[in-house]
Amino acid sequence: GMKNVPWHEEVLGFTQQVCDAAGGDYEVASEHAHSCAVLIAHKKFKRGGEWYTHIDFDKFLELAKSGEEFCSEDYMAKTPEWAVIGKGIPGDGGFDPAETHFRRGKRA
């Protein structure tokens, strides 16, 4: 049940510990607090201080059809600002502002 689900802040703290233990090659890149999810990304996906953790699917399909060898860096896309940890709307935890955010209160 929900009593066994960690709080998002606990998941973030644990995730940071994992990154630290990984020797500095990984960072916390993105979060979605509503899902209690955090994305750890290799620093190779950070260019000029910006994260590129999304996939350009059109580019991926183009590369796949070409028959040429390619890697993940060839079809990476910039992570939306709202999803980057610490850059989105304060307190929104990586929630896409284009989506409807329903907040439930306690039932009476």
Image (spheres, rainbow, N blue to C red):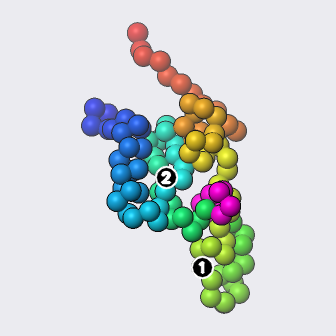
| 98 left or right, relative to 23 | right
Q: Is residue 71 above or below residue 9?
A: below
* Along the viewing direction, whichever of 16 and 3 lies nearer the viewer: 16
Mark 1 lies on a secondary structure that is loop
User: Mark 1–mark 2 contact, CB under 8 Å?
Assistant: no
The answer to whether residue 11 of the structure is visible from this angle is: no
Which mark identifies residue 21? Answer: none
- The answer to which image quadrant residue 72 occupies is bottom right
Residue at point 44%, 62% (across, down): 24
Residue 89 at x, y = what percent?
Answer: 64, 34
| 18 left or right, relative to 69 | left
Quarter of the figure that contains the N terminus:
top left
- Reading the image, the residue beneath label 2 is 28
Q: Is residue 79 above or below residue 4?
A: below
| 107 left or right, relative to 102 | left
Q: Amino acid at mark 2?
A: Val
Q: Is residue 15 above or below residue 6?
A: below
* Along the viewing direction, whichever of 100 and 44 lies nearer the viewer: 44
Mark 2 lies on a secondary structure that is strand
Residue at point 41%, 15% (across, down): 107
In 3D space, how far apart are the residues under numbered discs 1 and 2 (Cα atoms)?
22 Å
- For the view shown, which residue lies furthest in the top direction? 108
- Reading the image, the residue beneath label 1 is 71
Q: Residues within 10 Å of mark 1 (few under 14, many from 20)?
A: few
The answer to whether residue 27 of the structure is visible from this angle is: yes
Where are the magenta residues, as a range? 47-55
Residue at point 51%, 61% (across, down): 41
* Along the viewing direction, whichever of 99 and 13 lies nearer the viewer: 13
Q: Is residue 67 magenta?
A: no
Q: Amino acid at mark 1?
A: Cys
